[in-house]
Amino acid sequence: MKYIILSFFFLSIGSSTWAQQNWQGKFEQLDQQLPTPNSYRSASGAPGTNYWQQRADYDISVELNEDTQLITGRETVTYYNNSPEVLRYLWLQLDQNNLAKGNMTDKTETNQVRDSIPVKFFPLASDSYGYDGGFKIKSVKDAATGKDLTYTINFTMLRVDLPEAMKTGDKYSFNVEWSYVEKDRMQFSERGGYEFFPADGNALYAIAQWFPRMCVFDDYEGWQNKQFIGQGEFSLVFGNYRVRITVPSDHIVGATGMLQNPKEVLTKEQIERFERAKKTFDAPVFIVTEEEARKKEKERSKKKSTWEFYAENVRDFAFATSRKFIWDAMAVKVGDKTPLAQSLYPKEGIRYGPRNLPKQSKIR
């Protein structure tokens, strides 16, 4: 809320200053304050009669190595050119490069002299964590021919040169293979990462900004290819996601979209609870109870399972995974749709008090 207030504050100052400098007793064009209305956008900024948006569909397979914290992935991106422009290259975001060696964030960051500083910042300043961050791009290929595509990495941006220009109405598919080492989010103040729990020797993973993502191309500024330096996020392209997530078999995975293969990753009892949750509107159904989660904390499966999710017409995809997860869910009516409201959390996330002592045996 603090940032929103500050944003409006600066916007008010800027608008007032502009008005004082430019008010001449007549109306004049706002120039860079607001773009000139056209058939794509009206004067209010609302979509016009010829408004368009690009689209990008993703088919992704990703695997987590719990021992090395290595995330390995491959994706097929299908990009749709709905714009009136001819495209000869595509831009993707490489958000993880914000923590790569020689990143632009470190080069541009400012600071101030303080009377004191928290101890946890000293390893960051001296790089004593020894963290080797950032995407390692293995290949970028044409999906149809398998031929290598020419690409350029510029800090947090990836430009892919197209073999043929994309005209209006064209679509093009290409493959990207990558990997990166996931970060300890207790050391780095970044989105996503893992938290390690020494008491039981397990970790909880909240995975965000984890795959090369298409940048926005719009009528307002063309390609959004500004660098990501950690302070804020950019808008993304709508599309459909089919994502397969391979983790240790005793993990529970929560992700964008809907689980497609419950019979392959859940026990018979968990499937029964999962199906019951889809029809329950008045109270959460515990698919994994606290007692069951505590038991799994003491085990460590060497087998792997692949969870498959599908999400339609969304802008991004994130997931969380851990063997520590307690999992509850219940149905919610939203218009003509019935999504699941789900919670996944470790036992450390439970706050016991006189009114909410655990009584899961009495909960559906």
Image (cartoon, rainbow, N blue to C red):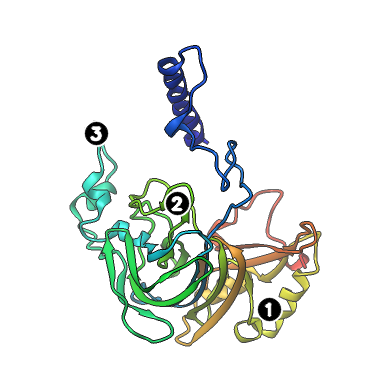
Q: Mark 1 or mark 2: which is in front?
A: 2
- Residue farthest toward the top in the current orientation of the protein: 25
Q: Does the image show residue 197?
A: no
Residue type at tag 2 = Phe
Q: Which residue is mark 2?
A: 234
Count neighbours of disc 1 (C-alpha within 10 A) and say few if under 14, some if 14 to 19, many if 20 or more: some
- Rendering coords of residue 267 (x, y %): 65, 84
Could you tell me which secondary element the residue under label 1 belongs to? helix
Give the residue at mark 1. 270
* Residue 310 in which image quadrant: bottom right
N-terminal-most mark, 3 or 1: 3
Q: Position of residue 117 (x, y in %)?
A: 26, 39
Q: Give the number of the disc on residue 250.
A: none
Q: Which residue is mark 3?
A: 112
Disc 2 secondary structure class: loop
How far, Cα to Cα, is label 1 from label 2? Answer: 38 Å
Between residues 173 and 318, which one lies in front from this camera angle?
173
Up-down: is 360 above or below 117? below
What amino acid type is highlighted by mark number 1?
Answer: Gln
Give the farthest residue toward the left: 126
Q: CA distance from mark 3 to mark 1?
A: 53 Å
